Amino acid sequence: MLAEQPLSLRELVHVIKAKAWGIQKAFEMFGDGRTRLMMWEERLVGWAPPPNGWVKLNFDGLLRGEGMAVADGLSRNSTGDWVYGFTTNLGICSIFEAELWGCRLAYNKLGTMAVGGC
């Protein structure tokens, strides 16, 4: 979400805390991220564009073999055009930490764009 006015530091911290709270709740429900869950649910997932003048931000953290973690994300505008994306190797960490890194990197890039442009 990229509004006409950049988010204040207080607003940015609030958004990140809210995301971290949601990630923590999922972490509490499904374990430490190192345990394979045998529950599978198949569902179709779609993407809905943000309002005109806004940017939608999607980010994720994931674990690969041997606990190696990756964080990635992308952003698209209201017409679905790609605005920016990133991926980074994090080394060994928990899924919770990987999700938080994804959040942090995504919002850092968003703040850079709001202040100085792409």
Image: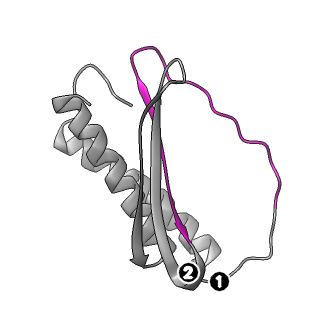
Name the residue that disc number 1 marks: 35
Helix, strand or loop: magenta stretch: loop
- From the viewer's perspective, tell me whether residue 26 is left or right of residue 111: right
**Residue range highlighted in magenta:** 41-63
Quarter assignment of residue 6: top left
Question: Extreme top residue here?
Answer: 52
Is residue 108 rendered to the left or right of residue 78? left
Q: Quadrant of the N terminus?
A: top left
The residue shown at (26%, 50%) is 13
Q: Amino acid at mark 1?
A: Thr
Q: Quadrant of the C terminus?
A: top left
Mark 2 touches mark 1? (CB < 8 Å): yes
The amino acid on which the numbered mark 2 sits, given as a three-letter code, is Asp
Q: CA distance from mark 2 to mark 1?
A: 7 Å
Q: Which residue is mark 2?
A: 32
Q: Taking 80 as reference, is 89 left or right?
A: left
Where is residue 54? Give x, y as percent: 40, 22
Looking at the rendering, which quadrant does residue 31 occupy?
A: bottom right
Residue at horizontal 36 percent and vertical 48 percent from the top? 106
User: x, y (%) of residue 85?
Assistant: 42, 43
Residue 47, above or below 40: above
The image shows residue 30 at horizontal and vertical percentages of 64, 73
